[in-house]
């Protein structure tokens, strides 16, 4: 079976070595602290909340823009080599699980190619759940 990383690379067209090049440098230090990330996430969510396509905007209809901005910049600060702001406040990022309530489909991931790992992660989670349902219907597994 293909790994999540293989699927994400195939769908996005971004090689894993390019995706993980962020680990070869400390972008938090290079960019000079938190403010560039606050600006990035503010600009990002201003555009998301003003998107011209209703189906895309509606994915965020239950989110407050200020919360979404903070969640995102704290996550990026942490992931790019800065202090663990996100985990101190909210725990493990667990991004596949946290996105499970939202329709992060192939169509949505076209907007943000990094999101293909969420699409693949959701598919794998659903496949595992289907296997469990089958076992439940057939009684306990004897194969372990
Ligand atoms: C098109 C693809 C995506 C869609 C539609 C999407 C949608 C959402 C939505 C609706 C939320 C809740 C907003 C909130 O924080 O209150 C959210 C949260 C979040 N997203 Fe995404 N997302 C996408 C891709 C990504 C990617 C690629 C990343 C990481 C690189 C990411 C990181 C996060 C983080 C860190 C949160 C905050 C989670 C939390 O603390 O609850 N998202 N996303």
Image: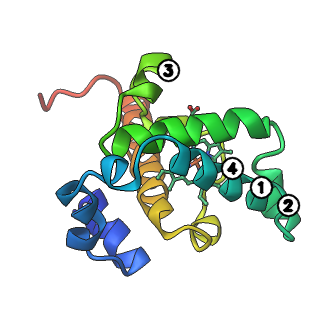
Real-space Cα separation, disc 1 to disc 2, in angstroms: 6 Å
Residue to which mark 2 is pinned: 50
Residue 96: image location, x then y, percent:
46, 43
Q: In the picture shown, does residue 9 fall above or below 136?
A: below
Mark 2 close to ligand 1, CB under 8 Å: no
| First along the sequence among labels 4 and 3 | 4
Front: mark 4 or 3? 4
Real-space Cα separation, disc 2 to disc 4, in angstroms: 12 Å
* Pointers 1 and 2 in contact (C-beta within 8 Å): yes
Real-space Cα separation, disc 2 to disc 3, in angstroms: 27 Å
Q: Quadrant of residue 125?
A: top left
Judging from the image, what secondary structure is the residue with disc 1 in?
A: helix
Residue drawn 69% across and 57% down?
43
* Pointers 4 and 1 in contact (C-beta within 8 Å): yes
Judging from the image, what secondary structure is the residue with disc 3 in?
A: helix
Residue 59: image location, x then y, percent:
76, 50
Q: Quadrant of the C terminus?
A: top left
């Amino acid at each position: 079976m293909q790994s999540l990383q293989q699927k994400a690379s195939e769908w996005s067209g971004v090689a894993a070595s390019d995706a993980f090049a962020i680990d070869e440098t400390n972008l938090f230090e290079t960019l000079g602290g938190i403010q560039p990330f606050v600006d990035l996430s503010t600009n990002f969510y201003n555009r998301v909340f003003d998107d011209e396509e209703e189906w895309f905007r509606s994915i965020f209809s239950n989110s407050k823009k200020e919360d979404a901005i903070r969640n995102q910049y704290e996550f990026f600060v942490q992931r790019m080599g800065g202090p663990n702001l996100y985990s101190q406040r909210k725990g493990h990022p667990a991004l596949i699980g946290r996105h499970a309530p939202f329709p992060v489909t192939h169509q949505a991931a076209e907007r943000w190619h990094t999101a293909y790992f969420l699409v693949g992660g959701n598919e794998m989670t659903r496949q595992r759940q289907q296997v469990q349902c089958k076992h439940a219907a057939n009684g306990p597994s004897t194969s372990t």
